[in-house]
Image (cartoon, helix red, strand yellow):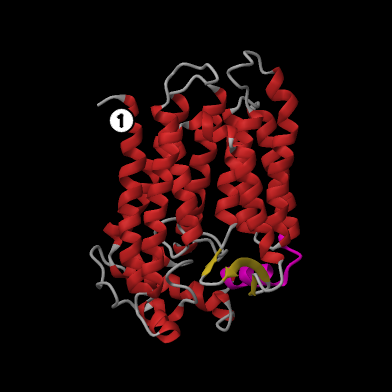
């Protein structure tokens, strides 16, 4: 098996499996809620299935277009995604819940545009923050790099204003990963990461709901009416899980979690499908991460390397945070797992990210700007 085929298999195979599994798990985890709200147990599952199909089509389109065309279109994609993200503040469009504006609702469509902006940010930073083939030196990239960083900061600040600090942290990581692929020194990136983490933590501490979640994480027994209740439910689901699980629809964790089909779907998988299935899900994301690294190493073009690392970070980071929350390693931060959770926008964004990774892997090694 060639290197390119291996990379595509590491990305496409796990992504397809996660997409199919996600439809099944969402159908099970949201059946009761869907029936109560819409009179049909498959309302959320059908939308998830549509999103997965659309994600597959987006991935195929990305491969057909090729990475260089995608990067040339990055400014337009970023502008559209930014407009969608700003729409959460529009009266009658943005949905205010739990002290934040993170979702939009237009007619029959609703979703969180954050994953779309994160994916677009990865593309834009790769396009503007790394040398293009037509410029053999890095001078052109250095001239445009401040603008790329500025757009990344704009995306992060958009999420801070919502406020959505998990999306802000993920997007900051994506910007740093893309810049690393574009040739920025590791020492500068490390310093930027430390400063960014400090600033985001300082800003987050000013919001009461964040400190409440931290208190619920540190002392869940004293916060049984808040997030501590869900922390305890996650701990019970993890502690009582068996290798094969209790069966879909038979778990008890979903009864004690506010959004079992989105923010806590990995806990549902662990309890109902077993530790082996949960391990397989984690292994699938690990394979995708390895595929992204191999795609970055397999190209001589800095822009494509930056695109691979940025897209890989945008896909894997939310999944890693989601697993960490469901395992009780970090406080509850409200992040879904792409493809497995009910989050149509995240599924479509993941399709674009996987398609970009596959496109980089399959791109000709000729570094001319075609």
Is residue 239 in view from this perspective? no
Nearer to us in this view, 95 or 302? 95
Which residue is at 50% across, 58% downward? Answer: 345
Circle 1 sits on which residue?
Answer: 5
Relative to 242, 326 lies left or right: right
Task: Assess whether residue 206 is covered by the magenta stretch.
Answer: yes
Q: Residue drawn 44% across and 75% down?
A: 233
| 209 or 163, nearer to the observer | 163
Q: Quadrant of the N terminus?
A: top left
Q: Position of residue 294 (x, y in %)?
A: 41, 30
In magenta segment, residue 55:
no
Residue reaching furthest to the top: 136
x, y percent for residue 334: 55, 65
- Asked whether, in this view, residue 187 is left or right of residue 236, the answer is right
> Which residues are drawn in magenta?
204-217
Q: Residue at x 44, y 65 (%)?
A: 342
Figure check: 148 above or below 207: above
Q: Residue 222 in the image: state x and y as whole percent.
A: 59, 80
Q: Residue at 51%, 55% (x, y): give it.
A: 321
Where is 41 relative to 206, above or below? below
Q: Is residue 242 visible?
A: yes
Residue 47: image x %, image y %? 41, 67
């Amino acid at each position: 098996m060639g290197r390119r085929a291996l990379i595509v298999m590491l990305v496409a195979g796990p992504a397809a499996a996660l997409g199919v599994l996600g439809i099944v798990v969402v159908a099970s985890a949201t059946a009761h809620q869907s029936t109560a709200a819409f009179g049909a147990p498959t309302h959320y599952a059908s939308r998830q299935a549509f999103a997965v199909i659309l994600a597959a089509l987006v991935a195929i389109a990305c491969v057909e277009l090729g990475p260089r065309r995608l990067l040339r279109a990055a400014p337009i994609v970023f502008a559209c995604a930014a407009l969608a993200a700003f729409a959460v503040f529009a009266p009658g469009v943005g949905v205010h819940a739990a002290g934040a504006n993170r979702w939009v609702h237009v007619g029959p469509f609703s979703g969180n545009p954050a994953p779309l902006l994160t994916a677009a940010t990865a593309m834009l930073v790769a396009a503007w923050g790394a040398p293009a083939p037509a410029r053999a030196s890095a001078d052109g990239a250095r001239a445009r790099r401040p603008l790329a960083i500025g757009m990344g900061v704009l995306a992060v600040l958009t999420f801070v204003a919502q406020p959505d600090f998990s999306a802000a942290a993920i997007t900051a990581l994506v910007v740093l990963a893309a810049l690393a692929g574009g040739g920025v020194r590791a020492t500068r990136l490390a310093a930027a990461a430390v400063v960014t983490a400090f600033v985001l933590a300082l800003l987050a501490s000013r919001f009461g709901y964040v400190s409440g979640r931290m208190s619920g994480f540190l002392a869940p027994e004293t916060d049984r009416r808040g997030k501590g209740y869900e922390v305890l439910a996650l701990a019970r689901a993890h502690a009582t899980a068996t290798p094969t699980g209790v069966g879909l629809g038979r778990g008890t964790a979903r009864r004690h979690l506010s959004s079992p089909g989105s923010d806590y779907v990995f806990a549902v998988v662990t309890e109902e499908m077993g530790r082996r299935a949960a391990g397989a899900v984690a292994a699938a994301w690990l394979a995708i991460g390895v595929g992204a690294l191999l795609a970055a190493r397999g190209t001589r073009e800095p822009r494509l390397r930056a695109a691979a690392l940025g897209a890989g970070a945008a896909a894997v980071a939310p999944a890693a945070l989601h697993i960490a929350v469901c395992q009780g390693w970090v406080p509850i931060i409200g992040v879904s797992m792409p493809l497995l959770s009910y989050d149509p926008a995240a599924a479509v964004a993941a399709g674009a990210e996987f398609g970009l990774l596959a496109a980089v892997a399959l791109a000709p090694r000729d570094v001319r700007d075609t």
